[in-house]
């Protein structure tokens, strides 16, 4: 397994409070990282919500694992912004992962992180 040099892991760990180099996992790109996360977290029958259109790797990994994949559609008439009410309807107690990505080339629109997934939205979902 590739995990970067000790010096690289030390440098990354120094960016985060209380992190140590042995807590840092370096991957060869996002594909390896996504694959490891999916293999660790997902099990057959779990539900996964993915953004569409968007990066399709998590969708494929979840599907191949036997998960039920639901898609949160980004729509032109909403300026490609996610509908958080639709997200609420897609997330159930069996949802194990919500994978969000934003295809930046659709219209050049840049969204702030808070506009995509406001923290209050996530907090209210966790309390239910």
Image (cartoon, rainbow, N blue to C red):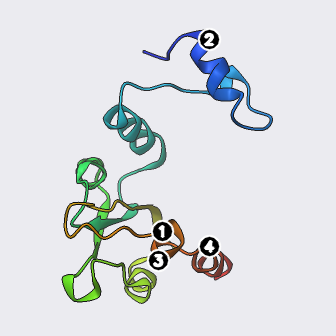
Q: Earlier in the sequence, mark 1 or mark 4?
A: 1
Local secondary structure at mark 2: helix
Q: Which residue is mark 4?
A: 119
Give the CA separation, mark 2 to mark 1: 33 Å
Q: Which residue is mark 2?
A: 7
Local secondary structure at mark 3: loop
Q: Which residue is mark 1?
A: 112
Give the CA separation, mark 2 to mark 3: 42 Å
Category of crowding for the residue at label 3, using alpha-carbon neighbours closer than 10 angstroms: few (below 14), some (14–19), many (at least 20) = few
Give the CA separation, mark 4 to mark 3: 18 Å
Local secondary structure at mark 4: helix
Category of crowding for the residue at label 1, using alpha-carbon neighbours closer than 10 angstroms: few (below 14), some (14–19), many (at least 20) = few
- Residue at image point 38% right, 62% down: 100
Q: Nearer the viewer, residue 103 or 48?
A: 103
Q: Earlier in the sequence, mark 4 or mark 3?
A: 3
Of discs 2 and 1, which sits in the foreground?
A: 1
Of discs 1 and 4, which sits in the foreground?
A: 1
Q: Which residue is mark 3?
A: 92
Asked if disc 2 and disc 3 are in contact, CB closer than 8 Å, the reply is no
Q: Earlier in the sequence, mark 2 or mark 1?
A: 2
Position of the N terminus by quadrant: top left
Asked if disc 4 and disc 2 are in contact, CB closer than 8 Å, the reply is no
- Residue at image point 32% right, 58% down: 67
Asked if disc 3 and disc 1 are in contact, CB closer than 8 Å, the reply is no
């Amino acid at each position: 397994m590739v995990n970067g040099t000790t010096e690289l892991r030390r440098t990354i760990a120094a960016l985060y409070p209380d992190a140590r180099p042995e807590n840092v996992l370096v991957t060869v790109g996002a594909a390896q990282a996504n694959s490891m996360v999916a293999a660790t977290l997902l099990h057959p029958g779990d539900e996964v919500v993915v953004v569409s259109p968007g990066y399709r790797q998590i969708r494929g990994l979840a599907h191949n694992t036997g998960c039920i994949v639901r898609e949160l559609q980004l729509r032109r008439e909403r300026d490609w912004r996610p509908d958080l009410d639709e997200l609420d309807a897609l997330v159930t107690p069996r949802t194990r992962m919500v994978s969000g990505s934003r295809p930046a080339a659709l219209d050049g629109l840049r969204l702030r992180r808070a506009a995509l997934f406001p923290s209050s939205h996530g907090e209210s979902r966790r309390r239910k």
